[in-house]
Image (cartoon, rainbow, N blue to C red):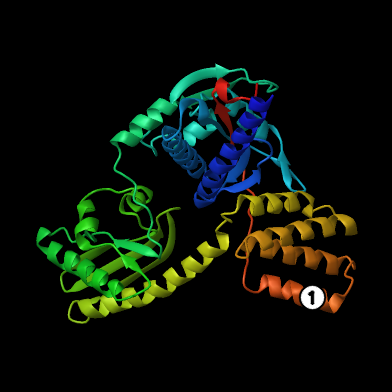
Amino acid sequence: MERVGKNETATVRDLKAHQAVVLPIVTEHGGRIIDTAGDGILAEFPSVLSAVECAVAIQRVMAQRNAAVEENRRLRFRIGINQGDVVFDDARIYGDGVNVAARLECIAEPGGICISRKVHEDISGKMQLAFVDAGEQQLKNIAQPIRVYRISGEQLAAARATAKPTLALPDKPSIAVLPFTNLSGDPEQEYFADGMVEDIITGLSRTRWLFVIARNSSFTYKGKAVDVKQVGRELGVRYLLEGSVRKSANRVRIAGQLIDASSGTHLWADRFEGAIEDVLQDQVTASVVGAIAPKLEQAEIERARRKPTESLDAYDHFLRALANFYKWTREENAEPLRSFYKALELDPDFSAAYASAAGCFSVRKGFGWAVNREQETAEAGRLSQPHSNALTHTNILARSAPHQCREHLPK
């Protein structure tokens, strides 16, 4: 029995350590964690592609972590992904969309991923990984058979071995300026486009709080069709600037766009056009740099607001609070408020907990439950002033749970 206790304790410890790494990956890919009950994770995503990319990233990270431990101590996750309608009830979601994702997780291989036909159709041609058609599957408690596609842990490991290494992000905002596309139809104009990029790189490098990738690294992508997310991972940057140059007769048009490499979201776009004698290269460079810097600052502020806590205990209190947040009684409102404060005690920078605690006070004010209306209004203002967080409801569902070697289970 002593051995049983040690095994069980070690399993819980290992699981929490893995979750502390996996949960931020979900948020980085735009996902929202709905539930972490038991040993599973239920999350929703704004797009099918984001959900699948997140699943692949999780399995690759888990493969790395497992490689460093003994075989009988390894935990392997199964992941199922589905797209479908869901029903929101308080802080939980229900429906066949959720049920199918859960059943897909159950039939996935340890370290692998299972997706439904709808998900496969949406990502077809958008990812380099090849999913294997597993045919129609009759899933437990699901009326109609579901066509399932699989990807094994071995394939994920092999794909990682042939891919370019992923660089860690620096500890400050980072950007790469990709070679601008020459749309002039005249190869002799390449010098103008390249010179523009070099000047922009130089200009951005003067911004001390910004890490700028050198020209030699970013120009390895010259003339290539690029996946901005992949480039961001390979160069280890959060943002990319890409653009184009078109010279025709005596006129020139320069277009640029700033992209969040982690999500592929466009943050800024503009163009500069005029007669060649009026559009001076240094003036355009100054305009681009001047426009990008404030956008980067704004994007970093928003990123900080969305960043989840790194404390798993704080996140646990946060999720417990959310479970009771929408139970509209005085008593049920007080309980999540205590949990939000406990989360903030564990992580004073947990922005989502600040915003949700302020929401509790707003509910108390609206329903007339405030004990001291003036003090609670002031506290709500204090909580909401420095932090804000917006949660969105989507219906791209990913369900994961760990599979572990039988030797690692409590006897």
List x then y, in percent, for residue 236: 34, 54
Q: How many marks?
A: 1
Q: Residue furthest front?
A: 2
Residue appearing at x 65%, y 41% in the figure: 36
Q: Tell me: 257 left or right of 347.
A: left
Left or right of residue 337, residue 196 in this image: left
From the viewer's side, name the closer residue of 9 and 116. Answer: 9
Q: Which residue is mark 1?
A: 377
Q: Is residue 354 above or below residue 376?
A: above
Closest to the observer, 231 or 345: 345
| Element under disc 1 | helix
> Dot 1: few (<14), some (14–19), or many (≥20) neighbours within 10 Å?
some
| Identity of the residue drawn at 68% across and 71% down | 384
The vertical placement of 185 against 398, above or below, is below
Q: Please tell me in which quadrant of the rendered image residue 198 appears.
A: bottom left
Is residue 279 something one can see in this rendering? no
The part of the image, by quadrant, that contains residue 216 is: bottom left
Quarter holding the N terminus is: top right
Instruction: Return the x and y of residue 163 as percentages of the image width and height.
Output: 30, 39
User: Residue 271: horizontal and vertical position, in percent?
Assistant: 33, 70
In the drawing, does residue 114 fall left or right of residue 389?
left
Between residue 273 and residue 379, name the one nearer to us: 379
Q: Position of residue 221 (x, y in %)?
A: 23, 52
Look at label 1 and name its amino acid.
Thr
Q: Nearer the viewer, residue 247 or 260?
A: 260
Quadrant where the C terminus is found in the figure: top right
> In the image, what residue occupies the spot 24% across and 57% down?
218
